[in-house]
Amino acid sequence: MEFCTINKKTDKKINFSKRLVLVYTSIVVLPLLIIVLIISFNLKRQQYAELSHYSLSSAEKNASVIQKHLETCDRIESMVNADGELILFFARPQSYSEENVIQIMKEESLSVERLLYVMPEIYSIRIFASALSIPERWPVFLNARRTNLNILNNWEYNYSATYMGNADALKDLSVCTTRKLYKNRAHVGFLQVSLRMEDFFPFLYNKSEKYESDYVVSLAPELKSSDDIRCVSNQKIENLQRPLSEYAKKKIFSNLFNDVISSDDKNVSGSMTFHENHFDQFVSYKVLPEVNLAVIHISSGQSINTIIVMIYICLALVLLLLCVVLFFVIRNVTRYLMSGIYTLMNGMKEVNKGNFNVQLVVTRNDEVGIAQETFNSMTRQINQQILQIKQEQGLIADTEMKAMQNQINAHFLYNVLETIRMQAVLADKDDIAESIQVLGTMMRYCLRWRIHRVPLKQEIEYIRSYVYILNLRNDYKISLITEIPEEYENVEIPKMTLQPLIENAFTHAIEPLGQDAKINVSAEIAPDGKRLHLCVQDFGPGIEEKRLTEMRRYLFDDSLERSSTGSIGLKNIQQRLTMFYGKDYRLEIISVENKGTLVSVPIPLTSEVKE
């Protein structure tokens, strides 16, 4: 046989290779581009989330500083009110002697001075007596007539104690709280506690980061609109580096007003974002209702935008460089790989035309070369198989003819048996006629293999016929006892399920003893109510424990063939149960030596069968 050799090149490979290079490059570059965009987006979102969280944390931190000072002032007020002797002295100074007055003033002054020593953040503590008869002891005890304390708010900002005369060290701008002192509901004086402005609002006086700003705004006791909110910078508390613009004030005050109005306890905090000067501004605020102040922290997104832009530029350059490198690498690799593939494709085209004598020139030792060698081997085998098929077709035709000539017609066999039975009836041989009739019934049941499932009552009738035939050939009697509830007689079971069990009981339990015996066939419902267990029980010598273990392992292992042990009938039943209902349906064998053996076959009560 002659073979033709192919070693052609085609111009189509150039266009296809270019397309392949572009596809491979796109397959690599597009996911990288998507990943870069996703990473950049997530990075920007994460940075913005962290900046927003940082802004809120800063506002709450600044608010906690003020809250700490408020608690300190409250503790000082509680300590002064708890000084019963001082309050009583302010209420009834006339009941004390001059010596006692001097002693009380001295001791109380020392007590306040010690308090100032342990609380360095407190700028001053001044106690004003309403009674004119109480002498002053500077700078702690003063007379209320020195200044009009009634016109002061509960909290005053940028407050200066001008009434302190030449004590310039006590006139610095401060945050001052003035509270009345009472004895039995009678006003006896005032307590004034002050902190320096830079101590009360340290975050306003500290140098802020480049992209951060801190503010404090005052809230009117009863807000009616956002116009009632004023930046405390109007009271000379201001961040001089970056004052709020009118646009920022409008946005922040409007949002703050809505939150305060909608809140029941007025102790609110919140965050917002607005765009100003080409950048996002993250604003967080915390309201302190005790002093009608709101602490505001603003963080600019300019720093994040700068970082993101740099990242975008770097990633774009890296991606561009990667695209160029990948293009040239993939192009050269594709050229090398596709040279052998096109030779293989040309060979396939020849085979498609009907030329099975084609052979390729193998020039490579890689996978493509192996494919070329495999193609050559395939074409040689195809030619050999074509010759073999021509030879076998003649043999098949002869074999089919012989099989048709030797085929047994089952209906002819049934007719012959029926003829013999009628002859026995005519000859008054009723026992022979009945035996032939039973045998014919059994053959019809067995040879109808296109029917794979039958009602339980038909299987019972078959095993009764089978036991009848067994009793004909033996000089002892086998009694078949069936205990099948009527409602389960129409349950469908695989055909020839019980007969192998009856045959095993006869072969292994009854025939060796050669005496009268009985076989019980019963049906029991499983505890779950979904299965019917068909039980076949004999009362023979039973099965040894070792043999019983081997049989159970043999039936459970689906990989073993039916001829691996002697239990062919049981294995056949188990394989059909698995085929119809699934692997959960398993035969169960219970045997006790010298007492007998029971085999249980599980059957589903539903009509569903595994396909």
Image: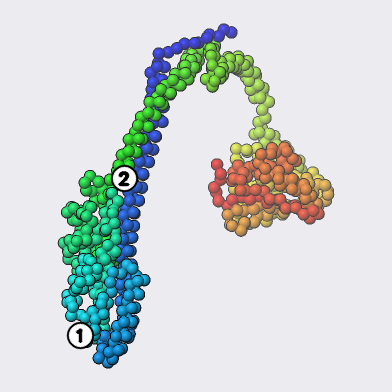
Position above or below: 539 against 360: below
Residue 35, quarter of the rendered image: top left
User: At label 1, which amino acid type do we have?
Assistant: Leu
The dot on residue 132 is 1
Position above or below: 87 against 416: below
Q: In percent of the image, x 31 and y 61: which residue is there?
A: 62
User: At label 2, which amino acid type do we have?
Assistant: Ile
Residue 130, quarter of the rendered image: bottom left
Q: In percent of the image, x 63 and y 20: which residue is there?
A: 396
- Give the Cα separation between the discs numbered 1 and 2: 64 Å
Q: In percent of the image, x 76 and y 42: which residue is there?
A: 432
Residue 462 percent location from the top left of the image: 68, 46
Quadrant, the N terminus: top right
Position above or below: 250 against 499: below
Residue 44 percent location from the top left of the image: 33, 44
Q: Is residue 152 visible?
A: no
Q: Nearer the viewer, residue 310 or 174?
A: 174
Q: What element does badge 2 sit on?
A: helix
Residue under numbered circle 2? 304
Residue 100 percent location from the top left of the image: 31, 88
Q: Is residue 4 visible?
A: yes
Q: In percent of the image, x 78 and y 48: which residue is there?
A: 546
Q: Nearer the viewer, residue 588 or 17?
A: 17
Quadrant, the C terminus: top right
Q: Nearer the viewer, residue 260 or 106?
A: 106
